[in-house]
Image (tube, grey):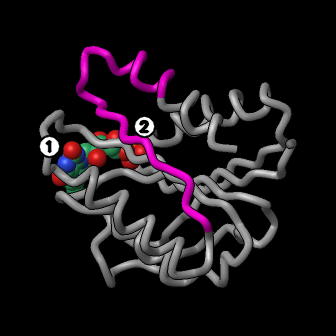
Amino acid sequence: MAMHLGIIIYSRSGNTRKVAGKLKEELISCGHSVNLEEITINGKTPAQAGQFELTAKPDPGNYDAVILGAPVQAFNLNPVMKAYLEQIPSLKGKKAACFITKHLPVKWSGGTQAVSIIEKGCTSKGAVFKGAEIIIWSSAKKQENIKQAVKKLAALF
Ligand SMILES: Cc1cc2nc3c(=O)[nH]c(=O)nc-3n(C[C@H](O)[C@H](O)[C@H](O)COP(=O)(O)O)c2cc1C
């Protein structure tokens, strides 16, 4: 069934934004209507917890489902997405999913941790969490990785 989907991201150096653009195209080709919105901040980057304010806080209330996208920072979810999750209102009745971009190809370098924080953030606000994808930017198979991740995310809705 066609849905109104929001892709809501934070991207400092553009990697997460690139994936979000491809995901938007894929979801549109599946018949959904899709908005891509960015969280922005007024502090220095890389953002440090407590040292920035959110200057754009996209409203998830506009959508049937949201897909959140953010990078890993220091083995953890980027603090901007953390702050966003803390500040948004209810996600009751909505579906949610996420994708994470990161550099390091090894386990335990922040991807799973970042997904787990987004999942908890979404479910604690009442959303049904459908799934997550992690994209490793340094991988030789990055393009294929992005393609598969985008297809899997689109298949959740
Ligand atoms: C300060 C900083 C810390 C980072 N820490 C990690 C890390 O712990 N693990 C990892 O895999 N990548 C790490 N990265 C790499 C980013 O997660 C990766 O480049 C990501 O795709 C950036 O997304 P963006 O271009 O959308 O901002 C870090 C990058 C920065 C700038």
Q: Using residue 38 as the reference point, say whether residue 1 is left or right of it.
A: right
Disc 2 crowd, CA 10 A, few/some/many (<14, 14-19, 20+) = some
**At 62% across and 71% down in the image, what residue appears?**
127
Which type of secondary structure does the marked residue at label 1 adopt?
loop
Query: Magenta residues, as a range?
Result: 128-148
User: Mark 2 vs ligand 1: CB under 8 Å?
Assistant: yes
The x, y position of residue 26, in whole percent, is 69, 28
Residue 15 numbered tag: 2
Q: Relative to 74, is 6 on the left or the right?
A: right
Name which quarter of the figure residue 115 lies in: bottom left
Front residue of 100 and 122: 122
Q: Which quarter of the picture shows residue 62?
A: bottom right
Q: In this view of the protein, can residue 13 be seen by the observer?
A: no
Q: What residue type is labelled 1?
A: Lys
With respect to residue 73, does 23 lie above or below? above
Query: How far across and how far down the image is residue 36, in percent?
Result: 69, 48
